[in-house]
Amino acid sequence: MAFLNLPTHRLRYRIDGERGPWLTFCNSLGTDLNMWDAQVGVLSNTFRILRYDRRGHGASGAPPGPYSIADLGGDVLALLDSLAIGRTHFCGLSIGGMVGQWLGIHAGDRVDRLVVCATAARISTPESWQARSEQVREHGLAPLMETTAERWFTPSFNASHPAVVRDILQRFAGTSVDGYRGCCAALAGTDLRAELGRIETPLLAISGNDDPVCTPTDLQAIAGGVVNGSHLSLPGRHIVNIESAQEFNAALQDFLVSPDSGNIDKSRDRSASARRLSVPGTS
């Protein structure tokens, strides 16, 4: 494991791949950098991949909260600076997608192409995040595992890939309570809807067809609100990069290497077929 030591905490990160443009992944709330394993195994032949545990998650430190989306975006920029990465493609899911939007608004010169997945410009309401934070403060994360599995994956995926689901839920339950609550505060305080028009970086918004957390409509709104965006919907719920890994990987490859990605038709809105695809390396 590699670490960047910052004034208030440290960030665990990992680099895969030896050549090609940089691609940075940013995970969802309650997960760690391993949620991108199915992407790294395929895309590291084309890209140099940087992934990390956000503050309060995985093996990174959990400084006292509350956190803001600017804090989380600042961590990304500090990591890029420490590794002398001037520009990178960026792919984030859920709160990671919000970090991506923040970077597109405030540091667009550092991002070549931007992929935001299973996210929104505002996710839920401040009141709901405050309630979630208090619930976790009182009872921890373990009681949320069952409902989290239902929100994150379809019933068929839960049934057909129990080891994959079990692994990601165990990582969820092991997340720092302080770190999780700090990120709940960041989510409660973030509403980027009025600023989407400032994102000029070519953007692809990917939704899960059956995501109850961030619906396809939320991703369509992001794609339509930026200067140069498109939307793609894939089979699955919230953690769509795992549930539809093969189609997800193909979409990233197509968007990030296509020479015309800088001239995306804003009206472009594709819906993938409903067939289920196996996760590479799983049964």
Image (cartoon, helix red, strand yellow):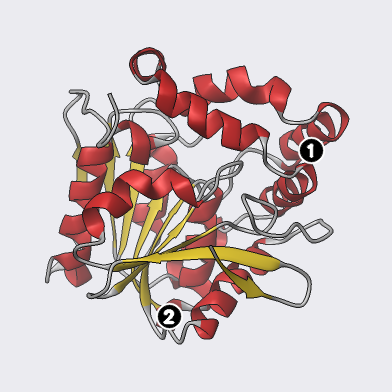
Residue at the image position 67 percent from the left and 37 percent from the top: 174
Q: Position of residue 68 (x, y in %)?
A: 71, 61
Q: Which one is in front, 18 or 140?
A: 18
Q: Circles 1 and 2: CB distance less than 8 Å?
A: no
Q: Position of residue 85 (x, y in %)?
A: 42, 83
From the viewer's perspective, is 259 left or right of 227?
left
Residue found at the very far right of the displayed protein:
138
Find residue 195 and report its horizontal and vertical position in percent: 53, 65
Residue at 44% in and 44% down: 35
Q: Is residue 173 above or below residue 72?
A: above
Q: CA distance from mark 1 to mark 2?
A: 32 Å
> To which residue does mark 2 refer?
110
Residue plotted at (62% across, 23% down) = 145
Q: Residue at x 33, y 31 (%)?
A: 243
Mark 1 or mark 2, earlier in chain? 2
Label placed on residue 133: 1
Q: Residues within 10 Å of mark 2 (few under 14, many from 20)?
A: some
Category of crowding for the residue at label 1, using alpha-carbon neighbours closer than 10 angstroms: few (below 14), some (14–19), many (at least 20)? many
- Of residue 255 and residue 149, the one placed in the foreground of this image is 149
